[in-house]
Amino acid sequence: MTKIDDHSVGLVEAQCAEFNEPLQLASGRTLEQYQLYYETYGELNPSASNAILICHALSGNHHAAGFHSYEDSKPGWWDAYIGPGKPIDTNHFYVVSLNNIGGCDGSTGPSSINPETGEPWGPDFPRLRVRDWVNSQARLADRLGIECWAAVIGGSLGGMQAMRWSLEYPDRIKHCVVIASAMKLTAQNIAFNETARQAICSDPDFSEGHYQQKDNIPRAGLSVARMIGHITYLSGDGMGEKFGRQLRSGTFEQGQDEPVEFQIQSYLRYQGEKFSTSFDANTYILMTQALDYFDLAREYNHDPVEAFKHANSKFLVISFTSDWRFAPARSKEIADALMAAGKSVSYAEIESDAGHDAFLLPNQRYETVFSNYLKGVAQQIESKQHAQ
Amino acid sequence: MTKIDDHSVGLVEAQCAEFNEPLQLASGRTLEQYQLYYETYGELNPSASNAILICHALSGNHHAAGFHSYEDSKPGWWDAYIGPGKPIDTNHFYVVSLNNIGGCDGSTGPSSINPETGEPWGPDFPRLRVRDWVNSQARLADRLGIECWAAVIGGSLGGMQAMRWSLEYPDRIKHCVVIASAMKLTAQNIAFNETARQAICSDPDFSEGHYQQKDNIPRAGLSVARMIGHITYLSGDGMGEKFGRQLRSGTFEQGQDEPVEFQIQSYLRYQGEKFSTSFDANTYILMTQALDYFDLAREYNHDPVEAFKHANSKFLVISFTSDWRFAPARSKEIADALMAAGKSVSYAEIESDAGHDAFLLPNQRYETVFSNYLKGVAQQIESKQHAQ
C-alpha cells in the first residue's frame, strides 16, 4: 500500500468531457466529436482566477499528480511539482491536467473508434498541430468555467503548447511557463524523431498503422523508438555516472566466449519493452510529427519577436544545463525574443546532469525558482480576491 | 569516366592473403583459417621501414584510396588523406589497408562459409576483440615482410586498433596515430550501439542471424541501425547548417493535410537504405560489440598510464571540436595518460562542425597537422636509408 503524504494531492480520479461541436483542425480536417480525459487538483476559487493548465509532453497524459488507488506504485508524472506546498501549490491553485487529443490514455486518438467507419481510426486519425491541442484545451476551459488561466505550464512539447496559448489566446492566459522547450526543433531533433518513426513503421506488426484490427502491436518497433528517445532524454554525463561500463552479466576475462551485457543495455531494453506495451504506436507517430511541425513564428514572418508581440502574458522560461535535446540555447532564444518584444520574462538556466528529463525530477534550484514565481502569481490572485 | 588526378593513387586492386595457421582469439575460440583482403599503395623501400598500416572503423574496408575502375563514381574511403602529396604520402610510404576479419568485404567474416559446416557462419562467427584484429594484422605484416610499421593509423574504432598495436607489439610500431577515438566507450556510446543492434535483431528478416540461408537480409533493421549511427556521426550544428528545417515535400500552410517531409528525413532514410543493401548485419553487430568491449587499460589495472608504459612508439592524437560520439575530452584522456607515462605525444584538437565524420573529410588544419607529423616520420626513415 502506497504511503500518501501531506504533500500529495492524494487519491484522484480521471474525468471525461465529451465535446460534440466539431473541432476545426489546422490540417483543414474536422474532428466532429471528441472526448478529453482530465484530472483536477485543488479548488477553483469563486472568481475562477486561480486555474492552472498543465500541458503534457510526448508520452505524458492527464495523470500528473496523486494516485489512482492505494495500490499504485507510482504517482502521476509530475507529482514532484504538483501538490500542497509544492511549486504548483494546490493550496492556492486549481490545477487542470488533460490527455491531449491524439493521445492514448482515454482522450480521442488513433486507437478510438472513428464514428464514420465503426473501426479504430489508426493511421487515418487527423494529423495534429500544437495549435489544435490549444484549441481543444480552450474548449475544456470553457466547459470548466475558466475564462482566463492564471498560468499555462508545460515542459518540452508542453512548453510549445504554453507558448502557442500565449499567441492564440493572449487574453486567456496571465502567465506562461515554458520549461525545457524550443520555438522549433533542430534538424538533429527531427532526425531522431524520424529514426524512431522509421523503427515503428518498418515493424511488420505495424501493418501500416492498422495493427489494432489485427489484434497486434508493433512491439519491437515501438521499443526501439523508445530506446532512441530515452537516450536523448538523458545526458551523456548523467548516463555515465549512473551506468558507466558496469556489467549485468558476462565477463571480459580472456578465454570467455559468452556475450557480455552492460547494465545500460538491459536498462534501455527494459525501458523500451515497458513502453511498447503501454503506449500506442500511432499516437507516438502523431506526437513526434506535431513536435517536428511546430514552428512558433512561422505565421509571423518567421520572426519570434513579431510573434511574441501578440502575447499579453508574463513568462517564466527554464532550461537545464545538460539538456541536449532542448538545449539552454533554445530557451535563451525564447527569452531573448520575449525581451525584444517588450514582454516580462524571467529566465533561469538550472544546473543539472539529468538531461532533458531534468524537468520531471527533483532539483533544489529548479523547485525554488518555480515556487517563487508561482507564489508571486498566487499572491496577485489572492490580493485581488481580498480587494473585491 | 572518373578523372583520376596526380594526387590519386590511381587504379588499385584488392589482394587476398590466405592464412592457414589457426588464429587464437581472445574469446578462447580459434579461427582455423582465414583470408584477408587488402590493398597497398606506394612502394615498400628496401629495408621495409616505410610501411604504414591503416586500420578501418566500423563500416570501413580495405579500399581506402584510389579507384577500382574508371567507372567508379567514388574513390576509397580515405582518399582525401592517402596519395601522392597527401598527408599519408605514397611518394614516401608504402600503405597497407585491409578489411578486418569479421568484415563483409572479402575478408573472412560472418558471411563466409564455415568450413566445419559448409554453411555461412552467420551469428556463429566468433565474437572478436580489437586485439584479435591486431594479431591478424601482425600476421599480414609478416606475410608482407614488414617487421616494424613506420606508423599504424586509425580513426574511431581504427584508433583503438592503433593503440592496441602500441601495447601488444611495442617493437613493431614506430608511430601510433589515433584520430577521433577513445580508450573505451561511454555508456551513451554503448546505448546507441545497443539500440542499433536491437533494431537489427528485432527485424523478423534477421532470422536470428541466419538470414543468408533464407536468401534474405534484415533490410529494415539495418537501415534503422544506420540512421541511428549516422545521426551520431554528424554534429547537431553541422546538421542544422546543412539541412535546417528545409522541406523536401509538402507545405505547412493551414488547411493542407498532406504529410510534410523535411530534407533531413529523406537524407537519413536514403543513407539507411543504401547501407542496408551493402553491409552485412552480422558484421555490424560484431563490429559494434568489439567497440563496446574495447577497454584499453582493462588488463593494466584499469590504469591507462600503466598501460601506455608498455608502448615504445611515439603518438599523434587528433580530435575534432564538434565530435560528440568520440568527444575531444576522450582524446585528451589519451594524451594525458601518454604524457603521464612519459611518452612522446602530439595532440591537436581540430576546429570542425562535421562531428565524428570530420576525420574522413577535408579540413585545412587537420591536413596540415597530419602532413607535418608524417613528413617528420618520412624524413627519419629517409635519413636512415641514406646513412646505411
Image (cartoon, coloured by chain):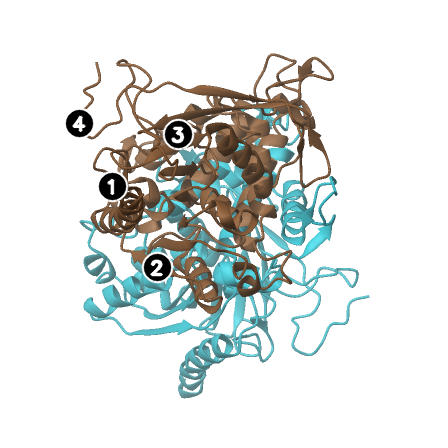
Chain colours: A cyan, B brown
Instruction: Examine the rendered structure and indicate whether residue B273 appears above or below residue A24.
Output: above
User: Which image quadrant for residue A179?
Assistant: bottom left
Q: State which mark lies toward you, 1 or 2.
A: 2
Which residue in the protein does label 4 denote?
A: B6
The local crowd at label 2, few if under 14, some if 14 to 19, many if 20 or more residues have their Cα within 10 Å, is: some
The residue lying toward the viewer, choosing from B225 and A300, is B225
Q: In the rendering, which numbered label is found on residue B362?
A: 1
The disc, 4 or 1, on the residue closer to the chain's N-terminal end is 4
Mark 4–mark 1 CB contact (< 8 Å): no
| Residue at figure coordinates x 49%, y 52% from the top left | A232
Host chain of mark 4: B
Q: Position of residue B237 (x, y in %)?
A: 30, 51
Mark 4 is on which residue type? Asp
Mark 3–mark 4 CB contact (< 8 Å): no
The disc, 2 or 4, on the residue closer to the chain's N-terminal end is 4
Which residue in the protein does label 2 denote?
A: B347
